[in-house]
Image (cartoon, rainbow, N blue to C red):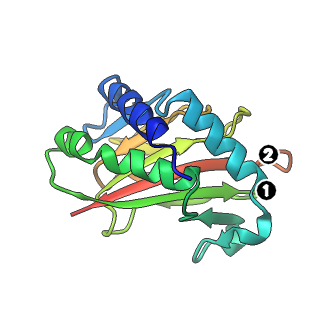
Amino acid sequence: MIDFDLVTRATEYSLRSLRERTQTCCPSLFMIESFLCPDLVSKLHEFISEYPDKNWVTEYGQSERNRMKLNWVPETVIEETHMVLENLTIAINEIFNRHDTFMGITVWKDREGYHIPKHVDNDAIDIALQLYLSPESGDFATEFLHNNEIIKAKYMQNSGYLLGDKVIHSMTTPVSADHTRYSLYAIWRR
């Protein structure tokens, strides 16, 4: 069952967090910290860490990289999180001066050996938000290349980035054997 009170509180919390985003040297890249309200992060992490492996789906084209995903699990914290991110659409559009439509969320589960080489997102993605969900630390954050400068997100639970342009990025340190890299990915498109 959906906890609408949690969705309302979490939306207000994330709107405040959006206002506190950190601008980088790349005009369309912002770092975000403590983005989802603690209750929602806790509920989400508990759900995904206990969700049976057999119900995760291999990300298209990512089987050799060990990436699994969850897109939608109705009447759960996945749907609540989707609702919160959808509620942020107007504020996110204001940041980038856009009129994009929220397309949804994916929760990624990256296992041992996962990494991704330098790339830019495909044209279907206009604005992207990635939020790390694993409570353990590591060197598994996304890094961006802008004007020959490397900008790296903080790899800590409930932190990540908001990107509104085609910027080269990668994850160069493969996920270690003793770690699972959980993250939330949300996209908006024109």
Q: Residue at x 67, y 43 (%)?
A: 45
Q: Which dot marks residue 179?
A: 2
Residue type, mark 1 in image = Glu
In screen coordinates, is 154 left or right of 96?
A: right
Residue 58 on image: x %, y %: 66, 73
- Reply above or below: 61 against 24: below
Q: Secondary structure at mark 1?
A: loop
Q: Are marks 2 and 1 in contact (CB under 8 Å)?
A: yes
Mark 2 and mark 1 lie on one chain; the one further toward the N terminus is 1
* Pick the front one: 169 or 31: 31
Residue 129 on image: x %, y %: 41, 47
Asked which quadrant contains residue 144, the reply is top left
In screen coordinates, is 122 left or right of 33?
A: left
* Pick the front one: 148 or 157: 157
* Pick the front one: 162 or 90: 90
Q: Secondary structure at mark 2?
A: loop
Whole-angstrom CA distance, mark 2 to mark 1, is 7 Å
- Reply above or below: 87 against 60: above
Q: Which dot marks residue 187?
A: none
Instruction: Give neighbour class at mark 1: few <14, some 14-19, many 20+ (Cα, 10 Å).
Output: some
Q: Which dot marks residue 112?
A: 1
In screen coordinates, is 12 left or right of 5?
A: left
